Amino acid sequence: MSATPLHDIWEASSSQPFLPSIPKGLQFPIAFTLLFIAVLLTGLFGLNNTLKNLPLYGIPASLAFA
């Protein structure tokens, strides 16, 4: 086994820096906002968990937690 292919990939990727889709300075505010929305919607669904509230509160809350 040779480590040359891995080293070649490493060297080739050095010219392409990683650029995240969410800038580093906005990651915490966006994550906190999504978590707050998820907890709020989960709480609202927990207070009145009828079948008609499932698409209104339950599904968006589960997507915000994901």
Image (spheres, rainbow, N blue to C red):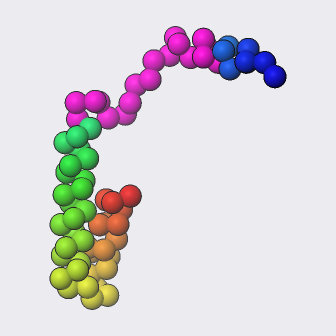
Residue at 27% of width from left, 88% of height from top?
A: 50
Find out whether residue 8 is within the magenta segment: no
Q: Is residue 28 above or below residue 34?
A: above
* Quadrant the N terminus occupies: top right
Residue 3, percent across and down? 73, 18
Q: Is residue 21 above or below residue 5?
A: below
Residue 9, percent across and down? 64, 18
Residue at 67% of width from left, 13% of height from top?
A: 8
Residue 28, percent across and down? 22, 40
Q: Is residue 64 above or below residue 47?
A: above
Left or right: 4 with respect to 64?
Answer: right
Q: Residue furthest right?
A: 1
Residue 13, percent across and down? 56, 17
Residue 64 or residue 3, whichever sits in front: 3
Give the number of callouts: 0
Q: Which residues are magenta?
A: 9-26
Find out whether residue 21 is within the magenta segment: yes
Residue at 45% of width from left, 18% of height from top?
A: 17
Residue at 23% of width from left, 78% of height from top?
A: 45
Residue 2 or residue 50, whichever sits in front: 2
Residue 9 or residue 60, whichever sits in front: 9
Please tell me in which quadrant of the rendered image residue 22 appears: top left
Left or right: 62 with respect to 5?
Answer: left
Q: Residue furthest front?
A: 1
Q: Is residue 19 above or below residue 31?
A: above
* Quadrant the C terminus occupies: bottom left
